[in-house]
Image: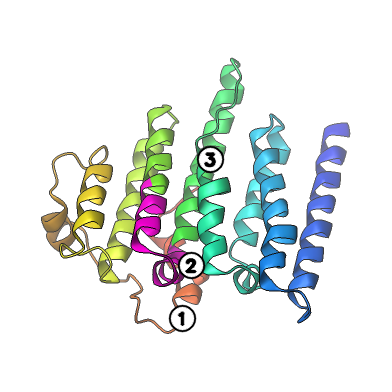
Amino acid sequence: SRFHSHSSKVDEILLRLRSHAESETGRDSTPNQELYKHYWKPWIKLCTNLVIERRGEIQEQTMVMLERTLSLESCEKALRSTDWKDLFNTLLVPFMKSEMGSDVQEEILYFGRIKLRGVMVLSRTFLLQYMRIYDSVNREDFLEMWKAILGAMEFVSSTNVKDANDYIPESVKNMVLVLAASKILIPQNNRLWNETQNSVSPWFPDSNLSPAVRDNFSLKGIPHAQDSKPFEAVRSGWYSRAVPFSIC
């Protein structure tokens, strides 16, 4: 069909542009700050814009490609910790807070499923990069990014997306557990602890964060910060086992 042909052409263009970004990443002569600014960020922005547009099959295929790209080793190599922080703040979080602008119920429901996949992408990317960001930026910047991510999750929850109440609390819980296991989310880190307590209350209104982390949330199987290969641990499928997901 004409629509399928159009979708295939979009895929082809995205793959060609991503291949160009990967090629530049492999060049020693290209400074890292240029890799993100001129190659990777424009590509990721193009993907988020395509997903927001009302193009059913293109939305889904672009979302899958975006998800895979954010866990590519070439992307990991190209982006510095400050680039990842910028990516969360300027593209991924605003994308999660975007609205479709349609009154057609079928389109709204479909976009909701896409948003749920976006929740998985957002939290999985955070789990891949949180330690690099935490070690490299000031604590205030990390806190603001973390609050923005939780705010995006709450926004999707508030839009009555089907199954959001099943998947979003699990995603939030997993991120909290990882921060706790990594000794980042601890009572001594007063502001992060208190802000997290306030931010998770929409999903866990009756839980005090301390006993929740200690008793109600199982830490078993979560990669610690001391893990020599945290990137591989999440990318290899730990997260997908922890939070089953399907947009079907």
Can you tell which mark lies on residue 237? Answer: 2
Judged left or right of residue 40, residue 134 is: left
Placement of 57 over or under 158, stated as above or below: below
Placement of 61 over or under 18, stated as above or below: above
Query: Which of marks 3 and 1 precedes in the sequence?
Result: 3
Please name whichever residue, 78 or 113, is drawn nearer the observer in this view of the structure.
78
Residues in magenta, as a range: 127-147
**Residue 79: percent from left, percent from top:** 61, 67
Dot 3: few (<14), some (14–19), or many (≥20) neighbours within 10 Å? some
**Residue 61: percent from left, percent from top:** 69, 46
Q: Tag 1's secondary structure?
A: loop
Residue marked by disc 1: 229
Q: Tag 2's secondary structure?
A: helix
Please name whichever residue, 234 or 166, is drawn nearer the observer in this view of the structure.
234
Judged left or right of residue 86, residue 205 is: left
Q: Tag 3's secondary structure?
A: helix
Query: Magenta stretch: residue 137 in it?
Result: yes
Q: Nearer the viewer, mark 1 or mark 3?
A: 3
The reply to whether residue 113 is in sight is yes
**Residue 6: percent from left, percent from top:** 85, 38
The Cα atoms of the two marked residues, 1 and 3, are separated by 30 Å
Residue type, label 1: Lys
Q: Residue at x 25, y 71 (%)?
A: 183
Q: Residue at x 69, y 59 (%)?
A: 37
Q: Residue at x 55, y 33 (%)?
A: 98
